[in-house]
Image (spheres, rainbow, N blue to C red):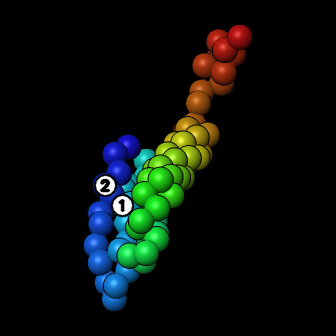
Amino acid sequence: MAAKVVKYSRDGVIYYEIRGALPDGTRYVDRVGFSERELEFRHLVAGRIRLLRSEYEIACRKVRSECATEVVTPGWVKQLIF
């Protein structure tokens, strides 16, 4: 699943927001804000954005696994798994 990272400013705070859709069709939104002083520490900002992306990937995997367990499988298919 692809996620979009949007950057915007409000009241002197720079926000990075990640938006995407989960495999079950629900929307995923998470954001983090930094003051202008905090933006001087670019490695911390980049690390937090990477963390946002990984949290989105984890949420996608979790929903995908939940969707897979809800699929009704015929009994003869379960017997073929070894």
Is any atom of residue 42 visible in this view? yes
Q: Residue 27 location in percent, x, y?
A: 40, 62
Tally of numbered tags: 2
Q: Residue 39 location in percent, x, y?
A: 41, 67
Q: Residue 7 location in percent, x, y?
A: 29, 66
Q: Are marks 1 and 2 in contact (CB under 8 Å)?
A: yes
| Above or below for 64 versus 48 | above
Please give the label number shown on residue 54.
Answer: none
| Amino acid at the residue labelled 1 | Arg
| Above or below for 50 versus 81 | below
| Amino acid at the residue labelled 2 | Lys
Residue with the mark numbered 2: 4
The 10 Å Cα crowd at callout 1, few under 14, some 14 to 19, many 20 or more, is some
Residue with the mark numbered 1: 19
> Of helix, strand and loop, which one carries label 2?
strand
- Report, in whole angstroms, how far the alpha carbon at label 1 lies from the one at label 2: 5 Å
The 10 Å Cα crowd at callout 2, few under 14, some 14 to 19, many 20 or more, is few
> Of helix, strand and loop, which one carries label 1?
strand
Residue in view at x 38 percent, y 43 percent:
1
Residue in view at x 71 percent, y 11 percent:
82
Q: Give the camera-side residue of 9 and 30.
A: 9
